[in-house]
Image (spheres, grey):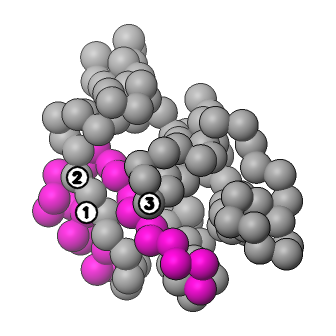
Amino acid sequence: MSELQGLQLSQPAFAARDTEIVAVVVDPVERNAQVAESLDLAYRIGADPTLAAIDAFGLRHDDAATGLSMARPASFLIDAQGRVRWRDLTENYRYRPRPEAVLAAIDSFSGLPSARPAAAP
């Protein structure tokens, strides 16, 4: 949940770059609403309990020990034309990119002066 809070704290920097944050998780809508309210999030959390979006991005992880399916941790930047411009994928559910890294990736493909190279999609 700290990654959700980190994104919230960086919300003004994302807004200044005309970038919308949307989190997508396997939890049901009710759980997402509780999380959003408890963390006072100003962005949307999409529910994907059927894993449709997660499967579309190839992120399903089937846990052999529990028999449950979940999403691999991933972050994507998708431009206005629907193209994936940057992604961060990991097998370690404890790792998420810091908001500063995501903002640097936005800058790198938006042509802003502080641009740094983004990870290859």
Kindly identify the amino acid type of the residue bearing the numbered disc 2: Ala
Q: Nearer the viewer, residue 95 or 108?
A: 108
**What residue sits right under mark 1 in the picture?**
32
Q: Residues within 10 Å of mark 1 (few under 14, many from 20)?
A: some
Q: Which is in the foreground here, disc 1 or disc 2?
A: 2
**88 left or right, relative to 77:** right
Residue at screen point 41% across, 49% down:
82
Q: Could you tell me how far apart the alpha carbons at marks 3 and 2 are, in whole angstroms?
A: 22 Å
Mark 3 and mark 1 lie on one chain; the one further toward the N terminus is 1
Q: Nearer the viewer, residue 83 or 106?
A: 83
Q: Residues within 10 Å of mark 2 (few under 14, many from 20)?
A: some
**What residue sits right under mark 3 in the picture?**
80
Discs 3, 1 touching: Cβ within 8 Å? no
Discs 1, 2 touching: Cβ within 8 Å? yes
SS of the residue at dot 3? loop
Mark 3 and mark 2 lie on one chain; the one further toward the N terminus is 2
Taking 65 as reference, is 7 above or below it? below
Q: Which mark is residue 24?
A: none
Q: Which residues are magenta?
A: 16-38
Name the residue at the top extreme.
Answer: 64
Which image quadrant is residue 113 in? bottom right
SS of the residue at dot 1? helix
